[in-house]
Amino acid sequence: MKSNAYLLNYMRTLLIFFCVTICASWVSGQAIHSFSACGCRVALRNDTLVIENSLIKRTWLWNNGNLITLSLENKPERVRWDTTNKLADLYLPSQSQKASDAEIHSELVPDSRQFKNHVRTTIRYTLGELHIMKIVKIYPGCPAIATELFYKGKASKSWFHTLTNAADQKNIETVTRSTEASKLPFMEQLALPGKHWKMKAVEFYDVTDRFNTLVYPVEAITYRQPTLYRGNLLFAENMESGEGFFILKEAPNSNTQLHYPHGDFLAEGGSFKLLGLGIDSLDIVPDEWIKGYGYTTGVYKGNDYKRDEALRKYQHNIRPVIPERDEMIMLNTWGDRGQDTRVNEAFCLNELELAAKMGISRFQIDDGWQAGKSANSAYGGSFKDIWSNPDYWKPDPVKFPRGLDPVIQRGKELGIDVCLWLNHRI
């Protein structure tokens, strides 16, 4: 009995000591948040937040959740940039910059059919009546950190009014003046040392009925004048050292983004800002999180191969990669500018032979294979009540007298999957 009582008292004493130690640690700010898994680490200590893995490390001033970047590191190359950022990474003009009610939570997201394992950190804070949720994701063995942004509550004013005329160069020059740049909302910024920076902004186009140049890169050497660039992808490199970083804007193409300020990146010397949140204050509602555009920032050093390799490492971590599903190259018949006038069995069989020589893995027969005539048809047609026609989606008996079987069979022989265009009811 005495030994049991002694053991019980000892455990009570140890528990009290442990609790006092932990409480003292929290009060003194020595250990507020710490999480490690799958080779990734998140630590908040002394108002400094660190998120890192074996390749990249980013350090922020916690600032009650309204993060301000302090440094960015390429760990294998032992490269560290100490930033001169004065504003929070997410800056909303006319909005209070004083954050409150900050929360942070980290968790391991395991491998699944939807995700590859990574550490996800959720940060919530409030600017006035506006609530912001920032989800930061880091993957093992990946030199990049991804960020998603959500908003709810009430904003003080409209954050930005888009230009009325994208072709008015005077307006664009006004926007890029130093006095006006501070009035733009941005979601990411890096103000880095060094006077000699070169950059490459890559803009992508879709709507192939209107555009035939689908990738439009612009290269420039940054200088004192703030300059606006379009694109979903920015590569920036210090020409003195060969050290670089990239920012991937995870949003639609520049042409189709919402609340678009006619540019995605604002560059001035070693200062780079990511613009275009995809959301304005009027879109925000009190009780539902509304997602804006996100971004991913990564590091690299070396030639173009190293740069592209760093980006691809991130892209291969977004979701499980199934090569036969995800690593495809598709050829579509509509691109010959003939609409549906050339689509027939002989045409498709010939296209398949050419596609095999080019390494195409998917061959899509666009509008014109079916018996029904759509509104896009060169022969005239309509989308009205097409579902009431039971023969609409049968192969055109004139163009494909043997049906689609010969085309599908030849595709299989060449290792190409044959796909079809369909129009669906909304």
Image (spheres, rainbow, N blue to C red):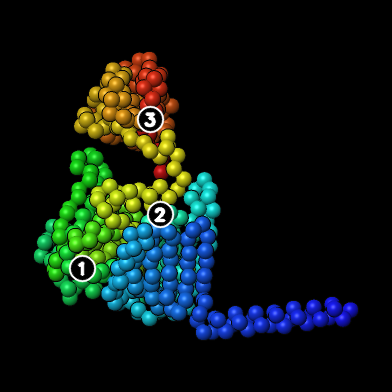
For discs 1 and 3, the disc positioned in front in the rendered view: 1
Q: Which residue is mark 3?
A: 419
Q: Quadrant of the N terminus?
A: bottom right
Can you see residue 408? no
Q: Residue at x 51, y 72 (%)?
A: 33
The label on residue 142 is: 2
Residue 25: percent from the left, percent from the top?
55, 81
Mark 2: which secondary structure?
loop
Quarter location, residue 195: bottom left
Q: Residues within 10 Å of mark 1 (few under 14, many from 20)?
A: some
Residue 216: percent from the left, percent from the top?
20, 48
Residue 204: percent from the left, percent from the top?
25, 48
Q: Residues within 10 Å of mark 3 (few under 14, many from 20)?
A: some
Tell me which numbered mark, 1 or 3, is placed earlier along the sequence.
Answer: 1
Which is more toward the observer, 171 or 57? 57
For discs 3 and 2, the disc positioned in front in the rendered view: 2
Mark 3: which secondary structure?
strand
Which is more toward the observer, 418 or 243? 243
As displayed, is residue 210 above or below residue 38?
above
As displayed, is residue 94 above or below residue 383?
below
Q: Quadrant of the C terminus?
A: top left
- Type of amino acid under label 1: Gly
